[in-house]
Structure formats: structure tokens, C-alpha cells
């Protein structure tokens, strides 16, 4: 069995990694683009994953030449998407893995590009589960200078966990997140969406189909019984 560097702290992305929100974002973004007879192709969809909502909206507007400001686009999106957040399910293996590590007192954090309001909406049905994380860094954190793919959010998470970057393992589904974590000097497990080309994720230390495939003992973490 392949082994990796010893890990003491875990950091997770939220959207598309712990919660299955990406299909919802994709659906709503395409609904808005369709109002202007535009189509979001897979290559653009790939670039949107893992970014702050402001950065994603800016990219859509510029690439598709949609005649809206970022603020106007986000207002239209929010008017649709918030009613669906409470029903977003966890992704396969997410609850089991995080609760297993929590039971063994392994410090865990969330580093999400979501700002406070959407984060609260997304986790409203999972308050008990999300209470196991030692810290949560959100996209509008006052100490956060740049969003993914810059390494700032992961370095801030490590700082608040009291961890060295080289002892942190990041779980990410987005290319921007993988790039950010590697730039922070951390190990990365990529869990791409099924429609993503895994060849794009070769920078990651490990690539899985779902969190249920993760074997903690490979990273010198407590194994499942």
C-alpha cells in the first residue's frame, strides 16, 4: 500500500466536496445565461469551480459577454438559488470520514470560497455535523486577502488550526483549490466531479472518485475499524 507524508490536520473545501452543490450552481448559472441566449460549456464550468461567487460571476459575464454588472448577476442568481440550499445532500463518504476523524480527535477545518450568508444557508440542515470542525474560513473572512487559486485561504486555516502547512492535507474537487493548496505547501487529495477530466488533476498527490475511497492509514491517520 502506498504511503504519504504524516498528516496531523485536515482541511476541506465545501461545495462539490462535502456538499453536492455544484450541480445546483451549474443549473442556476445556465438558467441565467440562457436569458441572454448564452451557453456555459464544460471548459468554462471547470474554471468556475472553487472560486468566490464574485469571481465566478465576473468570469461568466466576461466570457459570455452578458450585459450585467457582477452585482446585478449575483442578485439574479441569489433570487433563485437560496430556496434550494436546504435540500442539498452530502456527497458520498463525507459524513463518515469527517465524523470518523473527529472521533479520533484529529483537528479539521473547512476552507470555502462561500461567504457567510450562503455558507449558513447550505449547512442549515446539518448543524450537528458541521459542529465537529475546529474552524471555518469563509470567502468574506476579513483576514482573507485573495481567494483560490491563491494559497491564502489554506494558509489562514492552518494558522488558526495551529498547524504547519506540510502537516495539512487538503481535500478539493476544484482545480483552483488544488492549485491553491499546493501553493500553500500542503498535500492534496483531489475528488473531481464525474464529468471532469482527471488528467487535469495530476498536480494532486492523490485522485479519488469519492471520499468513501479515502484510506486514512495511507496518511498515517486512524484507519476505519
Image (spheres, grey):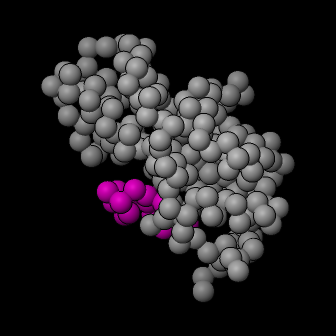
In the displayed orientation, state which residue is furthest to the left. 37
Residue 113 visible to an observer of this rendering: no
Q: Name the foreground residue: 123 vs 116.
A: 123
Instruction: Tell me: 186 left or right of 90.
Output: right
Q: Quadrant of the C terminus?
A: bottom right
Q: Is residue 190 above or below residue 123?
A: below
- Across and down, in percent, residue 59 comes to 36, 29
Classify 123 as above or below 67: below
The secondary structure that most of the magenta stretch takes on is: loop
- Residue shown at 28%/25% (left/top)? 32
The residue that appears at 32% across and 31% down in the rendered structure is: 29
The image position of residue 214, as x and y in percent, is 58, 70
Identify the residue shown where x is 61% and y is 32%: 120
Residue in view at x 81 percent, y 52 percent = 163
**Residue 52 in sight in this render:** yes
Whether 33 is among the magenta residues is no
Asked where in the image residue 148 lies, by quadrant, the reply is top right
The x and y percentages for residue 76 are 36, 18
Task: Give the quadrant of residue 188.
Answer: bottom right
Verify whether residue 205 appears in magenta. Answer: yes
Q: Is residue 167 left or right of residue 212?
A: right
Q: Which residues are magenta?
A: 191-208
Left or right for 37, reference 225: left
In the displayed image of the protein, which residue is found farthest to the bottom? 1
**Where in the figure is residue 166, as x and y percent of width and height?**
73, 59
Looking at the image, residue 196 lies above or below residue 22 = below
Amino acid at each position: 500500500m502506498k504511503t504519504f507524508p504524516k498528516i496531523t490536520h485536515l482541511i476541506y473545501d465545501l461545495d462539490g466536496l462535502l456538499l453536492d452543490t455544484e450541480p445546483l450552481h451549474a443549473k442556476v448559472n445556465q438558467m441565467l445565461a440562457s436569458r441572454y441566449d448564452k451557453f456555459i460549456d464544460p471548459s468554462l464550468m471547470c474554471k468556475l469551480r472553487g472560486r468566490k461567487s464574485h469571481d465566478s460571476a465576473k468570469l461568466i459575464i466576461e466570457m459570455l459577454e452578458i450585459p450585467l454588472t457582477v452585482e446585478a448577476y449575483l442578485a439574479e442568481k441569489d433570487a433563485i438559488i437560496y430556496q434550494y440550499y436546504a435540500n442539498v445532500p452530502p456527497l458520498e463518504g463525507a459524513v463518515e470520514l469527517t465524523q470518523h476523524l473527529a472521533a479520533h480527535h484529529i483537528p479539521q477545518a473547512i476552507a470555502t470560497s462561500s461567504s457567510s450568508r450562503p455558507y449558513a444557508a447550505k449547512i442549515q440542515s446539518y448543524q450537528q455535523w458541521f459542529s465537529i470542525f475546529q474552524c471555518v474560513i469563509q470567502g468574506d473572512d476579513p483576514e482573507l486577502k485573495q481567494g483560490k487559486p491563491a494559497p491564502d485561504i489554506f494558509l489562514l486555516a492552518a494558522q488558526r488550526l495551529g498547524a504547519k502547512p506540510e502537516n495539512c492535507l487538503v481535500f478539493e474537487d476544484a482545480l483552483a483549490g488544488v492549485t491553491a493548496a499546493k501553493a500553500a505547501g500542503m498535500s492534496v487529495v483531489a475528488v473531481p466531479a464525474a464529468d471532469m477530466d482527471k488528467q487535469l488533476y495530476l498536480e494532486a498527490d492523490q485522485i479519488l472518485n469519492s471520499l468513501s475511497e479515502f484510506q486514512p492509514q495511507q496518511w498515517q491517520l486512524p484507519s476505519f475499524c
